[in-house]
Structures are given as C-alpha cells and as structure tokens.
Image: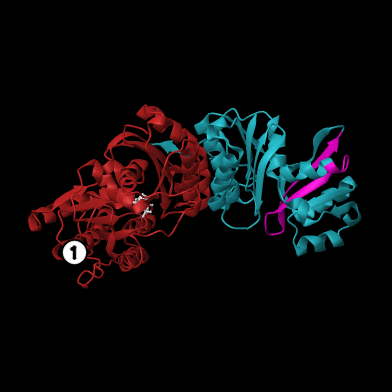
Amino acid sequence: MKILAIDTSNHPLSIAITDDDQLIATTTLNLTKNHSIYVMPTIEKLVAIAGWQPADLDRIVVAKGPGSYTGVRIAVTTAKTLADTLQIDLVGVSSLKVIGAHVAQLQAGRPTIVIFNARRNNVFAAGYQAQQGQMNEWLAQQHMSFEDLLQLVEERQEAVSMVGEFDAQFDEQVAQSPAHSLITRLPANYAIPSAYDLAILGRSAQPVTQLDEFVPDYLRITEAEANWQKKHPGELKQSYVREV
Amino acid sequence: MASRNLILAFESSCDETSVSVVEDGHKILSNIIATQIDSHQRFGGVVPEVASRHHIEQITRCLDEALDQANVTYDDLKAVAITYGPGLVGSLLVGVSAAKAVAWAHHLPLVPVNHMAGHIYAARFVNEFVFPQMALLVSGGHTEIVYMKDEYSFEILGETRDDAAGEAYDKIGRVLGVSYPAGKTIDEWAHAGHDTFHFPRAMEKDHNYDFSFSGLKSAFINTFHNAEQRGETLDRNDLAASFQQSVVDVLVEKTLKALQQYPVKQLILAGGVAANQGLRERLEADVTRQFPTVTLIKAPLKLCGDNAAMIGAAGEVAYRKGQRADMSLNAMPGLSF
Ligand SMILES: Nc1ncnc2c1ncn2[C@@H]1O[C@H](COP(=O)(O)OP(=O)(O)OP(=O)(O)O)[C@@H](O)[C@H]1O
Ligand SMILES: [Mg+2]
C-alpha cells in the first residue's frame, strides 16, 4: 500500500511517503512560513523521487488537528481533495497523537501528555499510554487551561512525560505546581512531528466513509459562533450553507 | 492532450464555494455555488474563520458535482483555473489548496486568476469581447474603472478611496435593519421611493476617476439618526432611493467621463453591485444616448456575485496567454491588477 502522509498542524511541516510500513522518503521543514507554499512542492518532489505517479497512491493520511486553524486546513484540504480526486482512501489522525504515540512507545507504561499552545494560557492536550502493545488514550484530546491540565495530573498521581509547545510561562507554572515532581518535560526535539509516524498510525486505521464531510478537529468553535449561540440558545440549525 | 477546450475553475475568495466547468471560455457546462450567506447573516457580516470552515465542508462536494453535471472526466480537461486573490486569506487558501491538489493529481496546468478579472469575464457569457474595452467594476470590496487596451491587460483608471459601493450598501443597510448583504433589498426599496434627501455626490466633478462613498454613508447615517432623535421616522423607500441615486449618479458620471477620454468599443458592467437595477437601467440609457458606438455588456444577473464560471472564462484566456502557476502558488489576499 502506497501511502502519502501530511502534517502541517503547527510550525513544522512534515510529509512522508511509505510503502506499507517502509519509509520511502520524508521531508520535515520547520520554517514557520506559510505552509501553502511548501506542501504541494514537497509532495511533488517526494513522489517524483520515488518514481511514482500520483495515481499510484493508495491512501492519504492526514493530521487533522488540533493545531493552527489555517495550518490544519491546508493539510486537510489538500488531503481531502487528493483522496477525492484520485478516488483513494483517506485517514485522519489526531495531530497530538502523531507526536504522543511516538513518545509513549519509547516509554512503555508511562503516560505521555502532548500539548499545543492555544494561547491565553490554554492548550490543546491529549495523553497516550503504551500498554501490552496497545496505544491507549490516557487523556482524551481537548482544549483546556494549562492550570486544569496540571491539576488533572495532580489528581491522578501518575508520573507522566510532557512534550509539546512550552513557553516560559508554562515552565514556570509546572515548577510551582504540586504536580511538578510527577512531570518530566521532554526536550523540544521530541515535539517535532514525523509524517512517517503519521503514516504508520494511519496505515491500519479505518478510512473515512463520508469524505465530503471530513473536516479538521478544531476542538474549538469560533468566538463569533460561541457568542451567537449564547445569545440564541436552541436556535442552531443543521446547516448554514445552501446551493444557489 | 484533451481535444475539448474545458477549464475546471475554483472560486472561494469570500463566502461562496464554487466550482465550474467552462467550455471554450464562454459556455457554462456546470457552475456549482454553495453560499454561506445564511451563516454570516447571524453575525451581520462575513466572519473570516467561519467562512474558511464552511469552505472546507463544501469543497469536494462542489468539485464532484461540477464534473458530474458537466458530464466530463479529468481526462477531458485542459487546465485548472483558480482564484488566488484578492479576498480573505483563509477562504482563498481552501480553493488554492484544492486546485493545486487536482492539478497535480491529473497532470493539468494550473492557471492563477485574479478574482476581479473573473468578475469582468462574467460578461463574456453575454458577448464576445472586442478591444479596447472598459469595465465599471462594482462589488463588495472594489469600485474601479478598468481600461483594457488588449485582451487580458488591465489598467485601473480610478478606484474608491474609502468604502466600496457594495460595502456602502451593506453599511447603510445595517442602519436600516436589513440583514447582510443589503444591496438587493435597498435596490428594491429604492424603486418604490424618490430622491428626496439629495445626499452629496462625492468627487463627482473632480478631474479623476476615483470614488468616495464614506461621506455619503455618513450623511445618510446622520440624517437617519437625527430624525430618530426627533422621534420622526423617515420613509425608508425615499431613504433608499436617495442613497441609490447618489451612488448611481457618481458611478455613471465618472464612467461617462472615462469613456470620453478613452475611446473603447465595449463597456462592461460587472461585480456584485452590477446586479443593481437602478445602475443597469441608468448606465444603459446614458451610454446608448451619449456613446452610440459603445456596446454595453452587463454581466448576467446570476453571474454578478461570486462564482467559478467567471473564473473559468477568465482562466481560459489566461491559459491561452500562457499564464501558469506552479505548486508553490499561494493565496494573495491583497492582489490587485
Ligand atoms: N441589487 C444590488 N444592488 C446593490 N448592491 C448589490 C445588489 N446585489 C448585491 N449587491 C452587493 O454586492 C456585494 C457582493 O458582491 P460580490 O460578491 O461581488 O462582492 P465580494 O466578492 O464580497 O467582493 P470583491 O469581489 O470586491 O472581492 C454586496 O455588498 C451586496 O450588497
Ligand atoms: Mg466578488
């Protein structure tokens, strides 16, 4: 099975092509530039290096968020359109899991929490734990305050690894938290997603059945939408888009 | 190489997701338009992040339907045309990403199209283009007089210095309690009223082809609020008629002035505000009377708003002119001619 895997959820951009579990070629950029410029040229180049044609692909695997809204949308639009136009399978994988599953595998039994900075002291977070060859969700992915995350670790009293987008404020809060002795913060190099890992995660997963409906996991509704819903309880309609 | 001259076009610059198949640059085989207006009406205007989210929900469905309805396959296509600006960056990126994916997957040339060139080429579905030519481009974000010496060359003779005409309609519409976008309703009211308020005609006599609508907008809002404070209600039809008369006067006056200095064979009226009945009638009457040798081509009502067919028509010409983008094409929100 020839797989193309795409992750542009945050600053890094990672693309890989694999044949089943075998890596053929991969490229990771960490330029923090507009992903739109580099996604397709990178795909084009890797597929050409492999000597493949676009039509040779069997499956697209995409990191479907959470992350930067625009970043995730570039990967998901590209992946969704490729799957649609080539009539091949599409698999979406949590962008947190791409990083978390890899790290959790290296430390069997020990939960790994991945965080993406969602600003205003909020994070997108999820926890993974490798047990008896299985990858379990220790913490379901969610949007939460960093404080709440620390409190959750404290309550569960388990030693965990934390990896992701830390800033000075987060480090400070960990240091001050009663949970600090439970938390091992992993260095930044573990927080760079690898599309090769993404391809492996997506290889055996069930493909999307309703391709047209496939959208990113933003984990947050927009501010405008939230305000509107607050003012108009019970009025939300199924769909706001119609054909003319 | 495909024998038919078919362009697959994408448009997602604002709040419509649209995909179309156009043959020979002037025949619409399909033109799927998914509009998000009902969503943005809740917020009183387009919210960019909401718009981007709707585009990604719609994009593949519109693509599949466009090919289905046109009854063509990817093998039949000659090129993929895409709006890459101007517009909202997040919205544009969905169309650009999708168009690039399709072009790469099927080894098709990718043709970048300026959204405003697209608006002009909506008129191509009415008549063949003859040059030199001029266009009055009036939309939600633009008000421009464009001179086209030859095919696919665009020179802006004048443009708005503040609000676009459509934007002004939407802003005064909000004051009158009309939901977004207000243009069509104001137009209807205007037809039932009279110009009793004589709002200012900005820059009408200036020796340039520029426009300004913010003064008119302020005059309108002041008149409305002053009356409100006095406890008076003004006739909404007369308010609409007065506003519209001022807009139409300036648009037409400046266009006629430009026609005097730049002799052209055709004048094109295009963009969302080109759907305005008052403007269509007035321009038709004045051009016929004062410039009998100039043919006025009004974009079809259905194609005044954003749609991919117009991008396909412009894309077909751009394709013949050899315009190509590679896979690094990015959205250009501030693109201009
Ligand atoms: N009958 C009408 N009279 C006046 N204005 C109208 C009419 N119908 C639509 N409009 C206006 O047209 C505008 C929408 O046009 P269009 O879709 O071309 O704009 P846009 O795509 O948002 O902007 P742009 O094309 O400049 O990027 C809105 O402002 C709307 O109020
Ligand atoms: Mg437009």
Residue positioned 28% across, 45% down in the render: B122
Q: Is residue B227 left or right of residue B46?
A: left
Which SS class for mark 1?
helix
Q: Position of residue B200 (x, y in %)?
A: 25, 68
B206 or B308, which is in the foreground? Answer: B308
- Reading the image, the residue beneath label 1 is B258
Q: Colour of chain A?
A: cyan
* Prevailing SS of the magenta stretch: strand
Residue positioned 83% across, 59% down in the render: A174
- Chain at numbered mark 1: B
User: Is A120 covered by the magenta stretch?
Assistant: yes
Where is the C terminus of chain A found, in terms of image quarters?
Answer: top left
Residue A208: tell me if it is visible. Answer: yes
Q: Is residue A59 left or right of residue B196?
A: right
Q: Quadrant of residue B141?
A: bottom left
Q: Which residues are magenta?
A: A106-131
Where is the N terminus of chain A found, in terms of image quarters?
Answer: top right
Q: Residues within 10 Å of mark 1 (few under 14, many from 20)?
A: many
User: Is B96 covered by the magenta stretch?
Assistant: no
Which kind of residue does numbered mark 1 sit on? Ala
Q: Position of residue A152 (x, y in %)?
A: 83, 48
Q: Position of residue A184 (x, y in %)?
A: 87, 53
| Chain in red in the render | B
Q: Is residue A102 left or right of residue B213?
A: right
